[in-house]
Amino acid sequence: MFNEGVSNQRRKSRKTHFSAPSFLRRKIMSAHLSKELSTKYQTRSIPVRNGDTVKVMLGPNKNREGKVTEVYCRRWCIHIEKLVKEKTNGQKAKIPIHPSNVVVTNLRLDKNRKALLACKKRDTGDKHKMKEMD
């Protein structure tokens, strides 16, 4: 039932998370889809990309909405268009937000993204077939 290759130790879990290669970081940098998109594409979450419209669900910027301008995988955060704070010297700084704290409200679709959604599409019939096989 349990995977023998995965450790339960917090230290090792954190190490694998923070030293993850870029192809795994992309997957970890996923966000939930809104209810409408979730029912339309029959999937719960998808990796965030530039051009997606997201809504912040947690933190001091809750309910703010905007387009993703940057997915910063090295710092585990995304930057959203209108989310900036003014520093004491007058400069504007982007506010970093973790993708798990946002909901994707509008997707920027292209050929690869459509293929990904088609692969991830949930088929409720498969679960029933698996139960019948047991």
Image (cartoon, rainbow, N blue to C red):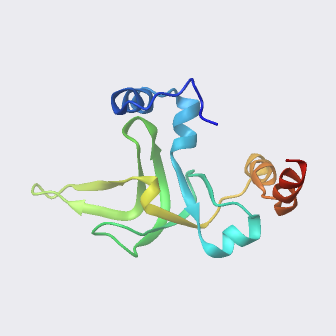
Q: Residue furthest top?
A: 5
Q: Is residue 127 above or below residue 63?
A: above
Question: Residue drawn 55% across and 52% down?
Answer: 50
Q: Say whether residue 70 is left or right of residue 36.
A: left
Q: Say whether residue 45 is left or right of residue 123.
A: left
User: Quadrant location of the N terminus?
Assistant: top right
Q: How many marks?
A: 0
Q: Is residue 114 above or below residue 13?
A: below
Q: Residue furthest front?
A: 134
Q: Position of residue 121 (x, y in %)?
A: 78, 56
Front residue of this view, candidates 52 and 120: 120
Q: Position of residue 11 (x, y in %)?
A: 33, 28
Q: Position of residue 51 (x, y in %)?
A: 57, 57
Q: Quadrant of residue 74?
A: top left
Question: Residue drawn 57% across and 50% down?
Answer: 49
Question: Residue drawn 73% across and 50% down?
Answer: 113
Question: Residue drawn 35% across and 33% down?
Answer: 10
Q: Residue furthest left?
A: 88
Q: Position of residue 94 (x, y in %)?
A: 31, 54
